[in-house]
Image (cartoon, helix red, strand yellow):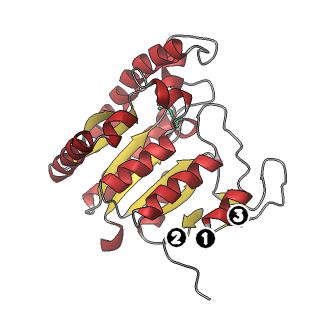
Amino acid sequence: MEDRKRIVVKVGTSTVCHPNGAPNLRRIEKLCRTLSDLKNTGHEIILVTSGAIGAGTHKMKLESRPKSIAGRQAAAAVGQCELMSIYDRFFLDYGSLTGQILLTKGITENETGRKNVIATLNALLEMQVIPIINENDSVATEEIVYGDNDTLSAVVAAAAKADLLVLLSDIEGLFDTDPTLYPDAQLISIVHDYDKAREAASGSHSEHGTGGMITKIHAATIAREAGIETVLTSGADPNVLYDICEGVSVGTLFTVKEEES
Ligand code: GLU
């Protein structure tokens, strides 16, 4: 456990929301229970969550994600409250306190801002609080247009000097070809060569999130530069986090080590 003590877990919109954008309560509850349990066994957990725009779109009864940036920012403002209130309640049920941190690229790339974020994260973890992070979508136009929470979670993992980054997605891991098009696609369980991984990635997008496979490899690359391994796997059953913490092989592990010859 010691070498996987501080863990950043990123959940995508397709993990925490139903296809219509409504929060997936059963999944979120399971996630909160598992993360609380892992915290109780000594892990330090940082949760990076997407889903604000999806949840807001649903709550405001909009037909689809707004097309305009301002519309998406409004949806994020509504959805972020909704998400946090759900997380806060479920985590509390399992004895965990939470704290919300909304970040922008501007903050994380500014030296003072970054230092402050690191100090706040460390203080929260020391106080046994689970930080819940999202991009501040309502003010960060660049996030919605270019950004994604895969990258954000890797930046957070690097800043927090995490021991592991876990990307929970709607796909089992990285495949040698697009599994939605080719049923015989093979899961790649370990990645040493990130350039080869990029070639294998289809770049396919899930309907509700903004991240595709390429952004996951980009995130793993940022983590690797900070000496952090990344596990990419499906978030369908949050219990998978127990296996990951115990070092069981699930999904795709992006290793920091060179391939043994
Ligand atoms: N921050 C966005 C949200 O909460 C999602 C970004 C992403 O899908 O990576 O809706």
Q: Position of residue 149 (x, y in %)?
A: 48, 40
Residue at x-position 36% and y-position 64%: 163
Q: Is residue 51 placed above or below 118 in the rendered structure?
A: above
User: What amino acid is at disc 2?
Assistant: Thr
The one of 261 and 84 positioned closer to us in this rendering: 261
Q: Position of residue 122 (x, y in %)?
A: 20, 51
- The quarter of the picture where residue 13 lies is top right
Is 130 on the left-hand or right-hand side of 104? Answer: left
Q: Are marks 2 and 3 in contact (CB under 8 Å)?
A: no
How far apart marks 2 and 1 lie (CA) works out to 7 Å
**Which residue bears the numbered disc 3?**
187
Residue at x-position 24% and y-position 42%: 117
**Which residue bears the numbered disc 1?**
190
Q: Position of residue 137 (x, y in %)?
A: 43, 25
**Which residue bears the numbered disc 2?**
255
**Few, some or many residues within 10 Å of mark 2 (<14, 14–19, 20+):** many
Q: Are marks 2 and 1 in contact (CB under 8 Å)?
A: yes
- Sequence-wise, which precedes: disc 2 or disc 3? 3
User: What amino acid is at disc 3?
Assistant: Leu
The one of 221 and 204 positioned closer to us in this rendering: 221
Residue at x-position 63% and y-position 69%: 189
Q: Is residue 17 placed above or below 251 in the rendered structure?
A: above
Q: Position of residue 119 (x, y in %)?
A: 18, 47
Residue at the limit of the structure toward the bottom, as seen here: 261
Whether disc 2's CB lies below 8 Å from ligand 1 is answered no
Is 92 on the left-hand or right-hand side of 60? Answer: left
How far apart marks 3 and 1 lie (CA) works out to 9 Å
**Few, some or many residues within 10 Å of mark 3 (<14, 14–19, 20+):** some
